[in-house]
């Protein structure tokens, strides 16, 4: 799921460059930037509701050393590391590395990841028969549409871990008692449950309305200017992928 954050950061970069080029009438360059936005959105939509594939991070890998620097802060916050994993990219190769953790009482789990785009952390709690609370601490990145039963909080990395935990726990308190998980296996099962919950909701939506909702949420204030063109281009790109017999990538 950290890979989702990296793709979303890339979309923001393309959007920023594209708008500047548009204002400067760099039509060809703007078209290339818009294509980058479209491909990023197709990737995000393909990842929505799909659980990542993982591979273990060797103990002597540089990524493990970098993640270890954050361990004292995690432990201080009663978040105990349970394993380091690579998210495997679409090419089958290890991509982003994340350190998974579980709180002392098991009610909060998630991961910490490091990348050139900056650090990011995701906190997750499952409230049985109700839904999920997720809190992303890191880059201000766009995301696809999600069900109202998934309460998503966001804050900048610099706001700190304590602020993230407070925001997250406030969200959990409004929904009910969280399910307790244990160890890496429990955390991964919890992630799978979250992804399945999102996938079930997305499958029940009207495809055209869901596409527009995704693009609107990702583009934000730029939807009024770019939304129509981006929706049409994403529809074409996904149609081509379907005709070729593959899932959108």
Image: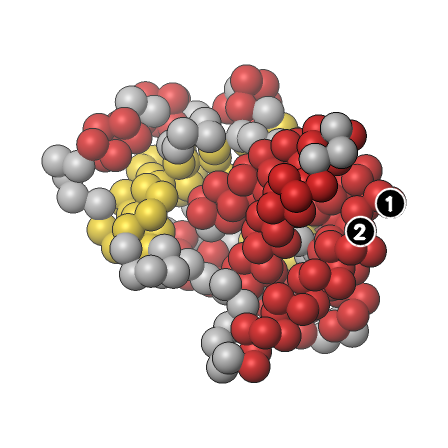
In the current view of this chain or complex, which residue is farthest to the right?
A: 224
Q: Which mark is residue 31?
A: none
- Image location of residue 27, percent across then percent down: 71, 41
Describe the element under mark 1 as helix, strand or loop.
helix
Can I make out residue 136 in this image? no
* Image point (56%, 81%), residue name: 243
- Image location of residue 239, percent across then percent down: 63, 74
Colouring used for the render: secondary structure
* Image point (42%, 41%), residue name: 111
- Taking depth in this image into account, of 14 and 156 the one nearest to the observer is 14
Name the residue tied to disc 1.
224
* Vertical side of 241 occupied by 37: above or below: above
In the current view of this chain or complex, which residue is farthest to the left?
A: 60
Q: Is residue 85 left or right of residue 216?
A: left
Name the residue tied to disc 2.
227
* Image point (56%, 30%), residue name: 139
- Image location of residue 122, percent across then percent down: 50, 40
- Taking depth in this image into account, of 201 and 35 the one nearest to the observer is 35
- Image location of residue 58, percent across then percent down: 16, 43
Mark 1 crowd level (few <14, some 14–19, many ≥20, 10 Å Cα): few
Q: Is residue 181 left or right of residue 32?
A: left
C-beta proximity under 8 Å, tags 1 and 2: yes
């Amino acid at each position: 799921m950290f890979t989702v954050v990296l793709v979303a950061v890339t979309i923001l970069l393309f959007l920023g460059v594209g708008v500047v080029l548009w204002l400067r009438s760099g039509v060809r360059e703007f078209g290339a930037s818009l294509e980058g936005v479209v491909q990023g959105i197709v990737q995000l939509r393909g990842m929505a509701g799909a659980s990542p594939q993982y591979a273990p991070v060797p103990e002597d890998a540089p990524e493990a050393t970098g993640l270890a620097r954050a361990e004292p802060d995690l432990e201080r916050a009663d978040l105990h590391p349970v394993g380091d994993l690579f998210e495997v990219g679409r090419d089958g190769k290890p991509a982003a590395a994340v350190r998974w953790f579980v709180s002392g009482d098991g009610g909060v789990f998630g991961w910490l990841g490091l990348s050139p785009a900056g650090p990011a952390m995701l906190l997750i709690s499952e409230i049985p028969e109700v839904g999920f609370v997720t809190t992303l601490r890191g880059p201000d990145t766009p995301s696809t549409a999600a069900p109202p039963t998934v309460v998503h909080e966001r804050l900048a990395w610099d706001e700190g871990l304590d602020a993230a935990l407070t925001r997250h726990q406030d969200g959990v308190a409004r929904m009910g008692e969280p399910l307790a998980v244990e160890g890496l296996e429990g955390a991964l099962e919890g992630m799978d449950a979250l992804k399945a919950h999102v996938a079930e909701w997305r499958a029940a939506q009207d495809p055209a309305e869901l596409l527009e909702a995704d693009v609107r949420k990702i583009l934000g204030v730029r939807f009024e200017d770019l939304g129509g063109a981006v929706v049409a281009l994403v529809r074409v790109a996904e149609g081509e992928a379907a005709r070729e017999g593959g899932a959108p990538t």
